[in-house]
Image: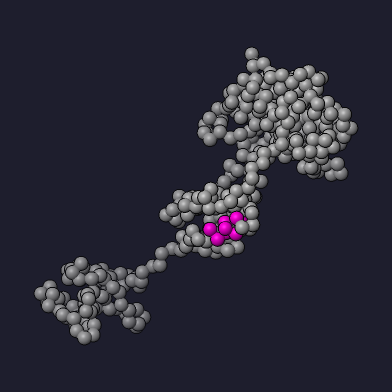
């Protein structure tokens, strides 16, 4: 069959008919003419079966270009190509991206990772885990969050949105999404809020009576834990998990310190706690009573477990301060004292293990403020001793 039989003049004169028709140029190339267009197509066979491939519309694709596409296609067929357009690679599912993202976050503590992954596994993945991430819709996310809102889980729904948003940010960075859908969800407008309640904490002037009442308690382990909590500014969970191996010395410190590893800290960063003389004495007493456990404060009946999370609150309740004081309240009290005493904000925030937004600044603070924090905690312990002796709870003098 002859090839290259058409001319541009012939093609221009081709007019629509009652039904679409074909006009061949040879070598399998033909024009498919309808009442609205003229399209180039190539007819060929694979394993004896007739196949057709679209090459574009005339005159966008000229006669010469169509012939070039035909010849290129024939060379590809000779080389074994089927000319079939490959379907675009499917996007990973939301469940797969969640697993990949959390596995990449080695900077976070195991507890934080577990909380985030568990929340998504409970609320999001059962409904949309198998959905390719590029097919996830804003309405899908709102369906989950609205359900949590109706159940009154106002704080938790914001965490779920945040954790899902982190995964979708990861998807955007890796080219699986054009935009993060959670960014368009304004939680402050769309959902309710829980009434804010802070951890109960005493005022500075209430400490003398509290400390004197604490000295009357006979449960020595819980009293030691409470006293050490007050003098280290730790979170209650961090105090409960303290281990004998955390005690040691560090360059730049004259005295002892606790070094709490990243895996037990909220923000997955090692935390150094300089110890006042009084705090070290409390630890020495606790070590004499811990029955050989790796924990400084082991559980009553299990040496392989830490002190119960209810121990501090139960002690406070026995003392008659339920609802007025909490273990976490010591952090607020100490922060108030330190600010009134004139210590620098960076030293205070670092001692509270609050995370600066600037990572470089965070590293700098850890080294720069260690000595200042040691002085601050010693002054704080001395001040607490004065309150227990029933001295008036005066505003402390600024540090020298």
Left/right placement of residue 387 relative to residue 192 reads right
Residue 219 in view in this figure:
yes
- Queried whether the magenta region covers residue 220, the answer comes back as no
Look at the picture and state if 90 lies above or below 263: below
Which quarter of the picture shows residue 61?
bottom left
Task: Locate residue 172, reporting x and y percent.
Answer: 45, 52
Residue 275 in view in this figure:
no
- Magenta residues span 142-149
Look at the picture and state if 142 lies above or below 324: below
Q: Which image quarter is the C terminus in? A: top right
Quick one: 132 or 352, which is closer to the camera? Answer: 352
Label tally: 0
Residue drawn at (71%, 28%) of the image: 203
Quick one: 33 or 221, which is closer to the camera? Answer: 221
Look at the picture and state if 167 lies above or below 46: above
Left/right placement of residue 33 relative to residue 130 reads left
Task: Locate residue 245, reporting x and y percent.
Answer: 74, 33
Residue drawn at (25%, 70%) of the image: 56
- Coloring scheme used: one colour
Residue drawn at (87%, 44%) of the image: 301
Q: Residue furthest bottom?
A: 18
Look at the picture and state if 12 lies above or below 394: below
Residue drawn at (21%, 79%) of the image: 35
Task: Locate residue 215, reporting x and y percent.
Answer: 85, 27
Which quarter of the picture shows residue 379?
top right
Q: Which image quarter is the N terminus in? A: bottom left
Quick one: 378 or 88, which is closer to the camera? Answer: 378
Q: Chief secondary structure of the magenta span?
A: helix
């Amino acid at each position: 069959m002859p090839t290259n039989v058409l001319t541009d003049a012939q093609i221009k004169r081709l007019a629509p008919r009652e039904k679409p028709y074909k006009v061949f140029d040879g070598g399998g190339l033909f024009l498919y003419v309808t009442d609205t267009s003229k399209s180039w197509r190539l007819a060929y066979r694979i394993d004896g079966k007739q196949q057709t491939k679209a090459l574009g519309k005339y005159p966008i694709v000229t006669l010469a270009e169509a012939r070039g596409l035909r010849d290129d296609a024939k060379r590809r067929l000779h080389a074994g190509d089927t000319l079939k357009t490959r379907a675009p690679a499917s996007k990973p599912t939301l469940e797969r991206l969640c697993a990949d993202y959390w596995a990449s976050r080695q900077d976070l503590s195991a507890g934080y990772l577990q909380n985030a992954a568990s929340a998504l596994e409970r609320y999001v993945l059962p409904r949309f885990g198998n959905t390719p991430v590029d097919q996830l819709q804003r309405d899908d996310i709102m369906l989950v969050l609205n359900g949590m809102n109706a159940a009154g889980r106002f704080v938790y729904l914001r965490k779920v949105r945040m954790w899902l948003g982190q995964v979708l940010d990861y998807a955007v960075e890796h080219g699986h999404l054009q935009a993060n859908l959670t960014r368009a969800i304004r939680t402050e407008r769309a959902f309710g809020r829980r009434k804010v309640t802070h951890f109960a904490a005493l005022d500075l002037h209430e400490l003398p009576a509290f400390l004197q009442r604490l000295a009357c308690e006979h449960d020595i382990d819980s009293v030691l834990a409470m006293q050490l909590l007050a003098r280290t500014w730790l979170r209650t969970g961090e105090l409960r998990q303290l281990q004998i191996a955390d005690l040691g010395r560090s360059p730049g410190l004259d005295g002892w310190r606790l070094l709490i590893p990243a895996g037990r800290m909220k923000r997955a960063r090692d935390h150094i706690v300089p110890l006042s003389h009084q705090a070290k004495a409390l630890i020495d007493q606790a070590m004499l009573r811990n029955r050989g456990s790796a924990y400084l404060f082991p559980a009553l009946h299990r040496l392989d477990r830490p002190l119960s999370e209810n121990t501090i609150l139960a002690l406070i309740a026995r003392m008659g301060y339920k609802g007025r004081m909490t273990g976490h309240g010591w952090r607020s009290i100490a922060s108030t004292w330190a600010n009134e005493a004139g210590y620098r904000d960076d030293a205070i925030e670092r001692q509270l293990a609050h995370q600066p937004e600037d990572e470089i600044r965070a590293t700098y603070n850890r080294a720069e403020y260690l000595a200042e924090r040691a002085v601050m905690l010693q002054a704080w312990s001395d001040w607490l001793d004065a309150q227990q002796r029933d001295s008036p709870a005066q505003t402390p003098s600024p540090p020298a």
